[in-house]
Amino acid sequence: MAEERGRGRRRDREEEVSEIVDKLVGINRVAKTVKGGKNFGFAALVVVGDQKGRAGFGKGKAREVPEAIRKATEEAKRNMVRVPLREGRTLHHDGKGRHGAGKVVLRAAPPGTGVIAGGPMRAVMEVLGVQDVVGKSIGSSNPYNMVRATFDALKEQASPRSVASKRGLKVQDVVGRRTDGASEAGMADIVS
């Protein structure tokens, strides 16, 4: 009976793994000069996600490209983080992230905007499942730093539910304040 449970779990894990989408962000060829010539190696940067709010990134190095990609994918799957999404399509609020000289700004966007982000940031948003977001990279265009800065910005995301529980309020109080403030400002413009 214990074996049956184990087999079932393994099957569930395989199904979970099959839902994960991976994207190759970049490959670097590196050369080491040795006595007999040059030894070439490859470094790969991969982002993975389930397109439902979980994503991770990893890097792998090997003498062959497929092996480097496999190592990077395995590391990325081990280092996945969960990001709360609003309506399953965008971020809850704007965020800034930084890693080294790489800085990124992410902004929540209304429906129909699409993913307006470049290069490595776009890959992260697509595997995360974000459909509407505006992103801007400031500073370094190094893919490693951009991916890390993007994840730094995503780590700061908080859902209204988590904010309400930390403050001891109801979700309506947290969200209500945001909409009430906007409607009062709008009403003031209309009245004057």
Image: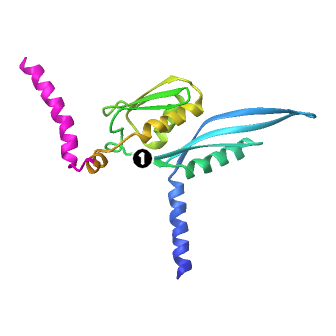
Tell me, yes or no, if residue 117 can be seen here. Answer: no
Q: Pick the residue in front: 19 or 169.
A: 169
Q: Amino acid at mark 1?
A: Gly
Please state the horizontal and vertical placement of residue 37, each as a whole percent of the image.
90, 32
Please state the horizontal and vertical placement of residue 178, each as a whole percent of the image.
21, 35
Residue furthest right in the image: 36
Q: Main secondary structure of the magenta part?
A: helix
Assign a secondary structure to mark 1: loop
- Asked if the magenta segment contains residue 178, the reply would be yes
- Asked if the magenta segment contains residue 143, the reply would be no
Tell me, yes or no, if residue 96 can be seen here. Answer: yes
State the residue position of label 1: 53
Q: Pick the residue in front: 150 or 13.
A: 150
Q: Pick the residue in front: 183 or 153.
A: 153
Q: Residue at x 80, y 36 (%)?
A: 40
Residue furthest front in the image: 167
Tell me where residue 72 sits by quadrant: top right
Q: Residue at x 27, y 51 (%)?
A: 165
Please state the horizontal and vertical placement of residue 116, each as a whole percent of the image.
43, 28
- Is 40 on the left or on the right of 179, as rendered? right
- Is 65 on the left or on the right of 78, as rendered? right
Segment tinted magenta in the rendering: 167-192
Q: Residue at x 54, y 56 (%)?
A: 17
Q: Pick the residue in front: 100 or 20.
A: 100
- Which of the image's four quarters has the C terminus? top left
The relative height of residue 20 versus residue 109 in the rendered view (above or below) is below
Please state the horizontal and vertical placement of residue 2, each as a whole percent of the image.
54, 80
Q: Residue at x 18, y 30 (%)?
A: 182
- Is 108 on the left or on the right of 4, as rendered? left
